Image (cartoon, rainbow, N blue to C red):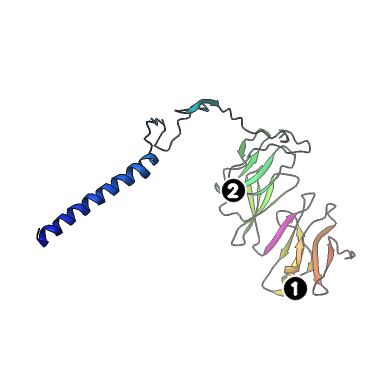
Amino acid sequence: MNASAKKILYIIVFIILVIGFGAMIYFVFIRDLVSPTNENINVNENVNGVLPITNGAVNVNRPGVENINAVINVTPPTNVNQERIDDIASGGETRTTTAIGTNTLAAESVADGTGIRYYDEILDQFFQLDALGNSIPLSSQKFPEADRISWSPTDNRAIITFPDGSNILYDFDKQDQVTLPKEWDDIQFSPSGDKIAFKNESSREGDRWLAISNPDGSEIQLIEPLGDNANDVAVNWSPSGQVVALFRESYSAAGQEIFLIGRSGENFKS
C-alpha cells in the first residue's frame, strides 16, 4: 500500500471515530436531560389591552388552575362627617344662589328695605332687585360709564359721578335730574338725606373748601378750608349727622392722628 492510500485510510478511520464518540456522548449524557412535554397551554386572554370585565365580574379560566369566579362590588365612599348645608342661615354652611348675573356697582338696600338697588355696568342702567329675585328697571334712562354713586338713605335719589368729573342728582321717582358742579368731589348724602357734603376742589387754593348743601346744590354752607390738604380729608358722615368728615395728620413715620370735622365747626377731640 502506497503512502497516498494510507493517508486516505487514516482520514476515514478518524471520521468514523469522531462520529462514534459523538453518538456515545449524546446517548449517555444528553438524551436523558431532554424530556419531551405534551402539555397543552390554552390561555384565553384579551390581547388588546382591555380586560373583559362586565358589571364588576371577573372570570378566570386556565388549564391547571382552579376556576375562580369573583364578583367585585364597589361602593363609593361616603363621608359620614359631611356637614349639612342649610337653605336658611343657622350658624353652619348655607346654600346660596346668584341673584344678579352681571357686573354691578353700588348695590345697596332700598330705603324701605324691600329690595336691592344697583347699577348694571353692562346695560348702563339702574335696577331694583325685589324679594322674588326680579330685576326691575328704575328708569329707562341710560347712564354710560357711571363711575361713583351715592344713594340717598331716605328716598329714591342718587348722585352719579362720571369719569370726566361731571356730577348729577337723579330722582328715580320723578325721573328728572339736576346737574351739580364738576369741582365737587366725594359727594355723600347725610344720614337724614336732606343734605349732602362734598369737597370743592377748585384750581384756586382759596376756593378749596369742605362744604354742605341741599342735594340739588342750593344753600351752600362752607365748613372748613382745605388748602392743599384735600387728599387728607374724607367725607364721612356720622350716624347723628354731627360729624361731616375726617382729617388725618401724620405725627411720625408710623403714626397718624385723625380729627373729626363737625358740621357746625365743633372742635372734637382727635
How far apart in space, not on screen, are marks 1 and 2 (Cα)? 38 Å
Nearer-the-camera pick, 249 or 155: 249
Magenta region, residue range: 180-196
- Determine the residue positioned at 84% across, 58% down: 243
Nearer-the-camera pick, 160 or 173: 160
Query: In terms of secondary structure, where does tag 2 sit?
Result: loop
Question: Measured from the top left, where is residue 90 in percent x and y?
Answer: 78, 35
Q: Mark 2 or mark 1, which is nearer the start of the sequence?
A: 2
Q: In which quarter of the image is residue 131?
A: top right
Question: Measured from the top left, where is residue 106 in percent x and y?
Answer: 67, 50
Q: In which quarter of the image is the C terminus?
A: bottom right
Q: Compared to 160, does 37 lie above or below?
A: above
Query: In terms of secondary structure, where does tag 1 sit?
Result: loop
Q: Which residue lies furthest to the front in this view?
A: 1
Which residue is under mark 2?
Answer: 103
- Determine the residue positioned at 18% across, 56% down: 11
Mark nearest the camera among 1 and 2 is 2
Q: Quadrant of the N terminus?
A: bottom left
Q: In which quarter of the image is residue 198?
A: bottom right
Q: Which amino acid does label 1 sit on?
A: Gly
Does residue 91 appear anywhere in the picture? yes
Does the magenta segment cover residue 84?
Answer: no
Does residue 59 appear anywhere in the picture? no
Q: Which amino acid does label 2 sit on?
A: Asn
Which residue is under mark 1?
Answer: 227
Q: Residue 190 carries which label?
A: none
Question: Measured from the top left, where is residue 252 in percent x and y?
Answer: 82, 75
Nearer-the-camera pick, 164 or 59: 59
- Determine the residue positioned at 71% across, 60% down: 186
